[in-house]
Image: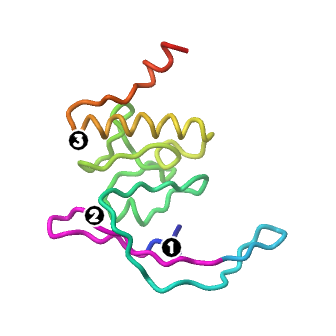
Amino acid sequence: MGDRNKSFISDDHGNVKAVQIIEVEYEVDDFGRRTKLGQSEPKEIPADLVLLAVGYQHTEQQLPEKLGVQVDSRGNIVATDKAYQTSVDKIFTAGDCRKGQSLVVWAISEGRECARKVDEFLMGHSELESKEAIHQYA
């Protein structure tokens, strides 16, 4: 992701309004090594919400540093267990960047729960099912 994401663009109130990216073309050899073949000119994609999915990569430290969120000794973003809120108001986190590398089913579960908490934060309530409600029917 480091080569693609150039910057977040905000409006006059500090809200994200677009993401500037550069598309990068790679070739992968038989050993899994990537060679950069080329890249596009910077372009903007309109956005009012940005979600980052970093997979099994360690959390990029530039973003937490720029956002001012607290990280633990392993570089994971610190967030409350039940609310998924970071040390900075209105910034939430879930999955690998919060807990470290794990299985995709764990990340999906965390993502769903975090989405529910963001919904509650923004709307005052959520119609998304909680993990407890889903397990109750299983």
Q: Identify the image quadrant of the C terminus.
A: top right
Q: Amino acid at mark 3?
A: Leu
Give the side of residue 103 with respect to residue 117, left or right.
right
Quote the CA–CA distance across marks 2 and 3: 16 Å
Q: Residue at x 50, y 13 (%)?
A: 137
Q: Amino acid at mark 1?
A: Arg
Does residue 108 sit above or below 19 in this rendering? above
Give percent across and percent down for residue 6. 42, 76
Q: Amino acid at mark 2?
A: Val
Q: Are marks 3 and 1 in contact (CB under 8 Å)?
A: no
Q: Residue at x 53, y 75 (%)?
A: 3
Q: Nearer the viewer, residue 88 or 20?
A: 20
Q: Secondary structure at mark 1?
A: loop
Q: Are marks 2 and 1 in contact (CB under 8 Å)?
A: no
Mark 1 burial class by Cα count in 10 Å: few <14, some 14-19, many 20+: some
Question: Is 16 one of the magenta-colored residues?
Answer: yes
Give percent across and percent down for residue 24. 58, 78
Give percent across and percent down for residue 1. 53, 67
Q: Which residue is mark 3?
A: 122
Furthest-left residue in this view: 13
Q: Secondary structure at mark 2?
A: strand
Q: Earlier in the sequence, mark 2 or mark 1?
A: 1
Residue 66: quarter of image: bottom left
Stretch in magenta: 6-25
Q: Residue at x 55, y 45 (%)?
A: 100
Q: Which residue is mark 1?
A: 4
